[in-house]
Amino acid sequence: MRVSITVPRSFNFKRTVLSHGWCALLPFTCDRERWQLGRVLDVPDSPPVTVNISKPNKEIHVEASRRLNKRQTASVIRDVRHMLRLDDNMESFYRTVRAVPDFEWIAHSGAGRLLRAPTVFEDLVKMICTTNCSWSLTEKMVTGLVRLLGTEGDDGRRGFPTPAAMASVPTEFYAKEIKAGYRSAYLKELADRIAEGSLDVEAWATSVLPTTELMKQIRGVKGVGPYASENVLKLLGRYDGLALDSWTRAKFYEVRNRGRKTSDKQIARYYSRFGEWRGLALWCDMTRDWLE
């Protein structure tokens, strides 16, 4: 079953898929030879479905692993639009970068849309799994969550676990089976709070709160510090924070400072010209060579 989705003229499928590491974390898969983004998605009244997303022409093609009814098809289309940021208005960002020498390429290439999960919950869990560890450990933790707690679809692949599924196991499960270390208590508490209804992270996606106030709510989740919260904000469409870590600092030294170390304040000053878009301008700048 194939569904076609119209995309904005500025949309760059490859740049969006490779915008950061999410495409390498289950239940995403990425085939760079055929340029297909795979994903297991939850659908109403049915087991999860696997979809393969590609852009062979001016439209997005979504191929599902089985026939879907009208309601399920609408759910898949909604999730794909959300993941690929098809409804994000990037024109203000593109006007800003066009005015800065050596940053015009961002607008010309249609970069800037950051791949995200269908839910804020999944993005938040994965962000916690990226803190203070190697990427290989992040992959191991997320793979464990999906394979051990995710619901199985018709083709044997599993979706991302629900808050209820993650709340159903004890903290020790995350330590022993997921190898989450000190994050085990954070993952358990997050799932418990959402499952019992005392925390609604999905509301962040449409929140009208000022960014500083929304940041406080995100920081109220245990295990979410400045780095993780600023990255979550980027996936919510707010790019004020730079979300600096060891990798972005080292990349900035290489790309913009001739290999010499500099302070975070100086990095912030360099991107301050981009205003509310500074965090996105930095990320595009640091990942320019990922596709080139």
Image (spheres, rainbow, N blue to C red):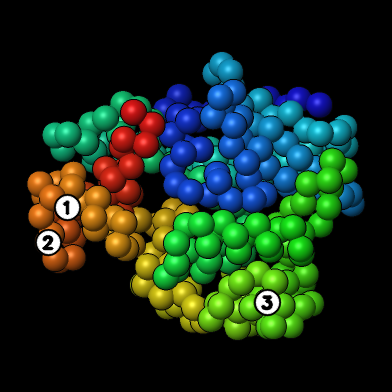
Q: Are marks 3 and 2 in contact (CB under 8 Å)?
A: no
Residue 183 in picture, x, y percent from top left: 55, 77
Q: Which mark is residue 181?
A: none
Q: Which residue is mark 3?
A: 176
Q: Are marks 1 and 2 in contact (CB under 8 Å)?
A: yes
Image quarter in which the N terminus is found: top right
Q: Earlier in the sequence, mark 1 or mark 2?
A: 1
Q: Which residue is mark 2?
A: 262
Residue type of the residue flagged with mark 3? Lys
Q: Residues within 10 Å of mark 1 (few under 14, many from 20)?
A: some
Q: Secondary structure at mark 3?
A: helix
Left or right: 292, with 139 as reference point: left
Image point (42%, 28%), residue name: 10
Residue type of the residue flagged with mark 1? Tyr
Residue 276: image quadrant is: bottom left
Residue 50 in picture, x, y percent from top left: 76, 40
Q: Which mark is residue 253?
A: 1
Q: Residues within 10 Å of mark 3 (few under 14, many from 20)?
A: few
Residue 253 in picture, x, y percent from top left: 17, 52
